[in-house]
Image (tube, rainbow, N blue to C red):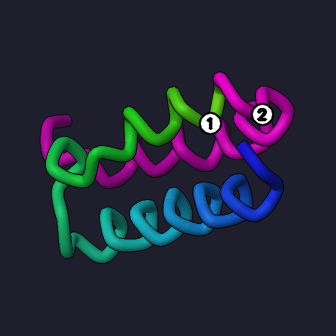
Amino acid sequence: MTERELIKLEALIRTKMEDIKKQRVSLKDSGIGGLMNTLKKVDEALYEKMMPDYKKMVRDYSIFK
């Protein structure tokens, strides 16, 4: 994966996180889990950097509490 594709992937994940926070799409329907898994395979350092934000978003904005 090129640097440009990696930047697009990060932007897509962050956009989906915002959509989930604003309840435009559900966590399950967003497909963000698959994108996070792809990110982990490609750039584990960036994955580790984004994981705390992802976990916080899942905890705070999940409809199943």
Say whether residue 16 is left or right of residue 42.
Answer: left
Callout 1–callout 2 Cβ contact below 8 Å: yes
Amino acid type at mark 1:
Leu
The residue at the far front in this view is: 2
Numbered label attached to residue 43: 2
Q: Secondary structure at mark 2?
A: loop
**Residue at x 31%, y 54% (from the top left corner):** 61
Q: Please give the name of the residue rendered at 19% of the width and 75% of the height, measured from the top-left corner.
A: 24
Q: Is residue 38 magenta?
A: no
Query: Which residue does the image show at 54% across and 32% down from the upper left?
Result: 38
Instruction: Give the crowd class for mark 1: few <14, some 14-19, many >=20 residues within 10 Å.
Output: many
| Element type at mark 1 | helix
Number of marks drawn: 2
Q: Is residue 16 above or below residue 2?
A: below
Mark 2: few, some, or many residues within 10 Å (few <14, many ≥20)? few
Work out which quarter of the rendered image holds the N terminus and state it: top right
Describe residue 9's horizontal placement relative to residue 47 as left or right: left
x, y percent for residue 31:
28, 45
Q: Position of residue 36 (x, y in %)?
A: 52, 36
Question: Where's residue 35, x and y in %?
Answer: 46, 41
Question: Closer to the camera, 45 or 7?
Answer: 7
The Cα–Cα distance between marks 1 and 2, rounded to whole angstroms, is 6 Å
Instruction: Let me know if residue 63 is in the magenta part.
Output: yes
Extent of the magenta region:
41-65
The C terminus, quarter of image: top left
Relative to the observer, which residue lies in front, 9 or 4? 4
Badge number at residue 54: none
Residue 21, by quadrant, is bottom left
- Determine whether 35 is above or below 4 in the image: above
Relative side of 54 to 49, left or right: left
Q: What residue is disc 1 on? A: 39
